[in-house]
Image (tube, grey):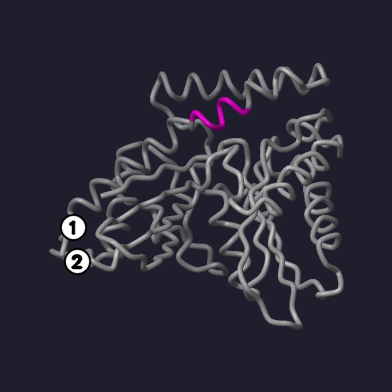
């Protein structure tokens, strides 16, 4: 059995938290560059140029690309042949977030209670999801999820008779209603199936995929591209000021569901799609 120490986990999460806020992924940068080639609005083109310039400055000067450095979302794939040693797994992750947000001078945005509104002061606790998988690897994915885009997310319990057209209508309508609030161009994560809570998690997980990474099922891969095309015809545009680049991509994840249900979730991600993955 492979052993992974909590110190290794803490050190890894610390580095990832900083890197995610400083370095926009190459997949997102490429999508932004591609968008600049086809954006029809002069204002929209100017915004896309500012976004890429901002990302360049953040990477070169080692500073956050956005003042909202987000709530730390950790997606863990824990191999069943991995043993965590020398401490508590959850606390090791939170300590990594705590150190990373302090060392990286990242804004602390977590409240200990949703109504009392008292800041914890160190951006913990992180939101942690653990999936037990075969093998002897530990995969850690971190996403810095900002409040502006997260607030533009939604779950809807459709009727089974609404079908795929109902899903399309809900997703596109949600983008239109969100307007410029989530700082478009956005990446739209869609969860379909499962239960009320499961479809929301699926939508969140889909945002961990790289831009351009299509669903392995051709039906859903085609649906991703169809939704992307329809969203970019809405005219919302960069920062909601009009244009042909409202979204950089749409990702879909699905799960089995009850015969009486058709749960659908939209999890919105701004253009600062900050996520990193490491396999230990």
Which residue is tagged 1? 4
User: Mark 2, residues whose alpha carbon is within 10 Å: few (<14), some, or many (≥20)?
Assistant: some
Left or right of residue 59: residue 253: right
Residue 3 quadrant: bottom left
Q: Is residue 27 magenta?
A: yes
- Main SS, magenta region, reads helix
Label 1 vs 2, first from the N-terminus: 1
Q: Tell which residue pokes out farthest to the left in this image.
A: 86
In terms of secondary structure, where does tag 1 sit?
A: strand
Q: Nearer the viewer, residue 66 or 268?
A: 268
Left or right of residue 67: residue 279: left
Residue drawn at (63%, 73%) of the image: 256
* Image spot of residue 159 (x, y percent): 82, 75
Left or right of residue 190: residue 43: right
Residue 130 quadrant: bottom left
Looking at the rendering, the stretch of residues picked out in magenta corresponds to 26-31
Which residue is tagged 2? 83
In the depicted structure, whether residue 136 falls above or below residue 56: below
């Amino acid at each position: 059995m492979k052993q992974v120490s909590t110190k290794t986990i803490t050190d890894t999460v610390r580095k990832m938290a900083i890197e995610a806020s400083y370095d926009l992924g190459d997949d997102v940068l490429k999508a932004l560059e591609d968008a600049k080639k086809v954006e029809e609005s002069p204002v929209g083109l100017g915004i896309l140029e500012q976004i890429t310039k901002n990302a360049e400055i953040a990477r070169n000067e080692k500073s956050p690309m956005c003042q909202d450095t987000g709530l730390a979302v950790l997606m863990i794939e824990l191999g069943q042949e991995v043993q965590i040693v020398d401490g508590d797994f959850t606390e090791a992750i939170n300590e990594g977030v705590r150190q990373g947000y302090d060392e990286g001078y990242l804004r602390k945005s977590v409240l200990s209670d949703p109504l009392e509104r008292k800041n914890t002061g160190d951006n913990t606790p992180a939101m942690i999801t653990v999936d037990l998988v075969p093998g002897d690897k530990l995969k850690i994915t971190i996403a810095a999820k900002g409040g502006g885009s997260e607030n533009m997310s939604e779950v809807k319990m459709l009727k089974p008779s609404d079908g795929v057209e109902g899903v399309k209508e809900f997703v596109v309508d949600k983008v239109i209603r969100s307007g410029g609030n989530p700082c478009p161009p956005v990446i739209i994560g869609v969860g379909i199936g499962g239960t009320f809570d499961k479809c929301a998690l699926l939508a969140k997980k889909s945002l961990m995929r790289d831009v351009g990474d299509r669903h392995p099922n051709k039906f859903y891969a085609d649906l991703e591209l169809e939704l992307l095309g329809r969203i970019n015809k809405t005219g919302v545009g960069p920062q909601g000021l009009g244009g042909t680049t409202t979204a950089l991509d749409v990702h879909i994840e699905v799960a089995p569901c009850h015969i009486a249900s058709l749960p659908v979730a939209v999890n919105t991600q701004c253009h600062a799609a900050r996520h990193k993955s490491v396999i230990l």
